[in-house]
Image: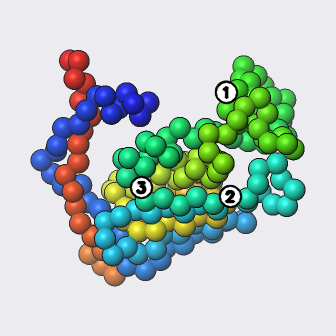
């Protein structure tokens, strides 16, 4: 999809899109998981994700950090696939979910690593979690600047942080946060039309 969007092109918009950062860390927690965003001095979004299923898990602990740009998204994140453990896959299949899929369609991890597949990056699961996080934080309605640090977060915790940031960004003139900058953004256009 990334290649199709890039091929469609972009059109500069007349209004600037706000870039928001917090003035102090905003942290949300769930059972065994933590997610937060820390202030930025510039308009850069950095994301760090620590994935850890625990001792003896089929997916080894891993961490990935990157500065999110269109280039790093395309090269390092967009191709990272959904993953799950063999036990999770068997439980879903028992419920009738995903029976048409094989291990080659996504990453299923067994005791010896991926089943019927190979990882594209040694830390592909952590990168996929960053992909999920970027998508969930897009719910904020503005671009973000800062350092997002995640430990074992998933969609529910990501959305909780997105809600908190959307509320803070809406009242950015108050003590909760500040607008860092704004930038003109492109809108995809179909060149074939």
Of badges 2 and 1, the one in the foreground is: 2
Residue at image x 34%, y 57%?
A: 143
Tell me the residue at 79%/33% (across/down).
Answer: 115
Is residue 9 or residue 140 the one in the foreground?
A: 9
**Label 3 CA crowd tier, 10 Å (few <14, some 14–19, many 20+):** some
N-terminal of the two: label 3 or label 2? 2
Residue 158, placed above or below residue 29: above
Residue 166 falls in which quadrant of the image?
A: bottom left
Give the x, y percent position of residue 122: 66, 48
Secondary structure state at the residue bearing disc 3: loop
For the point 26% across and 75% down, the residue is 173
| Residue most extreme to the left | 14
What separation in Å lies between label 2 and label 1 (alpha carbons)? 22 Å
Q: Which residue is mark 2?
A: 62
> What residue is pinned by disc 3?
68
Asked if 87 appears above or below 103 in the picture, the reply is below
Q: Is residue 148 visible?
A: yes
**On residue 105, which mark appears?**
1
From the viewer's perspective, is residue 35 above or below residue 59? below
In what element is the residue under mark 1? loop
Which residue sits at x=17%, y=43%?
A: 12
């Amino acid at each position: 999809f990334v290649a199709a969007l890039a091929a469609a092109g972009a059109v500069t918009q007349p209004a600037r899109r706000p870039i928001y950062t917090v003035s102090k860390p905003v942290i949300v927690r769930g059972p065994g998981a933590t997610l937060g965003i820390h202030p930025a001095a510039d308009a850069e979004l950095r994301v760090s994700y620590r994935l850890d299923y625990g001792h003896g898990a089929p997916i080894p602990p891993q961490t990935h950090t990157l500065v999110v740009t269109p280039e790093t998204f395309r090269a390092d994140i967009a191709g990272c696939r959904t993953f799950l453990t063999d036990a999770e896959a068997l439980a879903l299949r028992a419920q009738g979910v995903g029976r048409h899929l094989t291990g080659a369609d996504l990453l299923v991890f067994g005791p010896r690593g991926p089943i019927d597949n190979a990882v594209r990056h040694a830390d592909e699961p952590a990168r996929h979690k960053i992909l999920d996080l970027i998508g969930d934080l897009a719910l904020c309605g503005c671009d973000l600047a800062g350092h997002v640090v995640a430990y074992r977060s998933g969609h529910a915790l990501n959305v909780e942080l997105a809600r908190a940031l959307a509320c803070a960004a809406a009242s950015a003139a108050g003590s909760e946060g500040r607008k860092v900058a704004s930038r003109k953004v492109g809108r995809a256009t179909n060149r074939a039309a």
